[in-house]
Image (tube, grey):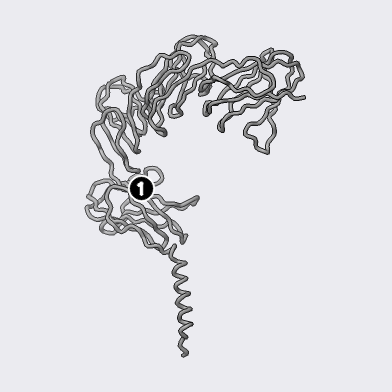
Amino acid sequence: MQQPTRRGRALATGIVTALVVLLLPACAAPSGGTVVTQGYYDGEYSIISPVTYGYDGVAGQDLNLYFTDTRTGETSTPSLTLVAPDGSTVPVSELRGSYTKRFVLPVTGRYSIRLRYPDGDTGVRRYTLAVSRDEDRGSTGLGRLGSVIIGQEVTYVYTGTAGERLNRYGVERILGPGDGEVTNNGLRSAQVTLPVDGPYRLVVERSGAVISQDLPAILAGPGATAVPELLPGQHVDLRYPGTAGEVLGVGTSNSAYSIELRLPGDAPFPGGERTRYVLPTAGTYVVALTGDANFGAAGTTVWLSGDLDLGTLGEGSWPAVGRVPGQSFSATYTAPAGTQVRVRTLDPPGVKPAVVVSSPSGLTVVGVRDPEPPYVSDPWTTYTLTESGTHRILVVPSANYDGGTITLELDDLP
């Protein structure tokens, strides 16, 4: 048999080397292989490179295993199996969410945590494994609670008094003396009223949890009112003495605070959140503020206002000079019946304010917005006036976005 030439051997070696390089992504060296304790672990795995970790457990103890990987848009689920020291599979005692399996260990010894690829894809995925046991951390006071490993459940004990209002942010459940669950009181978001004196168990399943009491109420009038820093989920009430038929604009300088206007008697204002309200009766209204954990801690300023009047306007561009956050503004426009006028607002990117045009008799004039495409960030709306006289143009900023200066533009059509 003829032996391959040196050149042939070199060519064959090069082909084999190239194939190995091409297959390397599918044959990545497996992660894992260590003995884990409570904490986070990550790495890479593939269909031919499963990952196994060891865990030294004690009979009767709990074990939470959170496992997910970098799959994108696939329906297959990565497989996590806990194998006992004798080789048997440990049954799952509880599922927490989509990615956490909870086990009760049957024996003492070294367990195997096996992470297997979910399908026949030859790619490599990164994974995250979180290992934890539930904890009872004893007594706590008001304020921020400690960190929690994802998939873990942590319990604190809070000594409360009957009638106390307690705000819970990130606290899954509050269990009173006798283990009955205390549900929200409906007065403020995520707030409970404790029914009796005694110890209450706080069940926490996420980091960043906070328990707090409301800050003392603040008496507010028209204009600016300074509000101190709020913890996540904490509330403070501004009390405003209003009159029937009064227009009240509500705005803030800090989007870390959600705002809700409530009627005298503390019932929700009908119609939901907005920036402009017409008060139905005389009485003390409540502007309830809530702190949000998605933003840094800081105080804020709340503005309570009536409509800003820009006076009588003609064709041109008119900025609402002096407008405060949450404040609506109006203008008058005089023209005979049959006039066509285009109206639009210019403002920073975000949710556009609402524009309402009213005829001299008080009827709303319906406008026709310019068609799309093309997309225009500040589109015109054309109004055909059916009455002669002075019309009113009202501009109301969105409750979701009030981005500063708003300019009203009017264009008389020939």
* Vertical comparison of 90 with 230: above or below: below
Residue drawn at the location 33% of the way across and 31% of the way down: 210
Residue drawn at the location 77% of the way across and 19% of the way down: 338
Residue with the mark numbered 1:
66
Return the residue found at the far bottom. Answer: 1
* Residue 120 in sight in this render: no
* Residue 286 in sight in this render: yes
Please provide percent x and percent y for residue 340.
74, 23
Nearer to us in this view, 315 or 301:
315
Please provide percent x and percent y for residue 168.
35, 29
Q: Say left or right for 329 vs 47.
A: right
Picture quadrant of residue 160: top left
Residue drawn at the location 45% of the way across and 81% of the way down: 9
* Vertical comparison of 32 with 12: above or below: above
Residue type beneath disc 1: Tyr
Please provide percent x and percent y for residue 8.
48, 82
